[in-house]
Amino acid sequence: MKILVTGFEPFGQDTENASGAVVERLRGFEWDPGLEVVTSILPVTWSGSAPALLRAIETHHPDAVLAVGEAGGRALVTPERRARNIGHGRIPDNDGAPRPAAPLDEGPEFLESRIDPALLVAAIRSVSVPAEVSDDAGAFLCNAVYRALLHETNLPGTFIHVPAVRSQGSATVGRETDPDAASSSSTILTIDQPTDAVAASVKAVAELLMPAV
């Protein structure tokens, strides 16, 4: 069983991205026999993020994909129920490119996660990290990557948002998932907790799919 976990590079003026930090930390984990976890860090660009995801899938041939991004207006870890058919760069990406609101593909308005988000919430809560299912992955690059995963592949796959925690200071970006939300002052998670949450999700996905592989 091989599971690909992706995160994002730092965005804007921030030197960290919580999703990328989680992925980096997962590289040092010891997993159960029969489980291999491979990782990739995606660029925060409209031209590069989805293609980088698809290249990582082509390179690693995973059995499942768990994509991770950060949501600066959230204090909980939030597995996403669905990806929207909309892409909108309200502010420029790391290439300085904006994006007017427009569909991402010719598909339906929503594509549903191929892994039950409630299963992931239960796994995350089992390691004492607060979590809830989200019905809105936003319209920025997290949603675009999620949409590409569901539209361009048939793999079991899903997306998890983690709070925009930082090792020092506070995030200055990361609100694009919820543009109208202020950065969450109630976020008290350390980077260890989102890492534990994603690791628990990986194990839950492996347990779910192992008999079918």
Image (spheres, grey):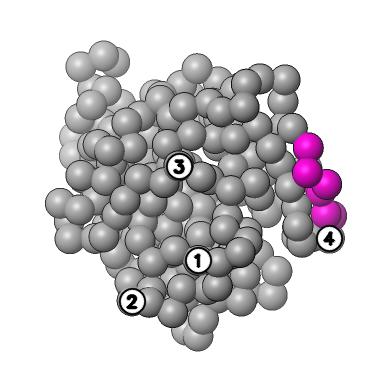
Q: What residue type is labelled 2?
A: Ile
The residue carrying pointer 3 sits among few (fewer than 14), some (14 to 19) or many (20 or more) residues within 10 Å by Cα, namely some
Report the mark closest to the observer, 2 or 4.
Answer: 2
Quarter of the rendering containing residue 149: top right
The residue lying at 62 percent from left, 27 percent from top is 109
Report the mark closest to the observer, 4 or 3.
Answer: 3
Q: Can residue 4 be seen in this view?
A: no
Q: Residue 188 carries which label?
A: 2
Q: What residue type is labelled 3?
A: Asp
Q: Position of residue 164 (x, y in %)?
A: 48, 67
Circles 3 and 2, Cβ within 8 Å, touching? The answer is: no
Q: Is mark 2 on a helix, strand or loop?
A: loop
Label 4 to label 3: alpha-carbon separation: 29 Å
Farthest top residue? 212
Q: What stretch is highlighted in magenta?
A: 97-102
The residue lying at 79 percent from left, 60 percent from top is 92
Circles 1 and 2, Cβ within 8 Å, touching? The answer is: no
Which is nearer the N-term, disc 3 or disc 2? Answer: 3
Q: What residue type is labelled 4?
A: Gly
Q: Where is residue 8 in the image (x, y as percent from the top left)?
A: 57, 54
Label 3 to label 2: alpha-carbon separation: 23 Å
Q: Which mark is residue 96?
A: 4
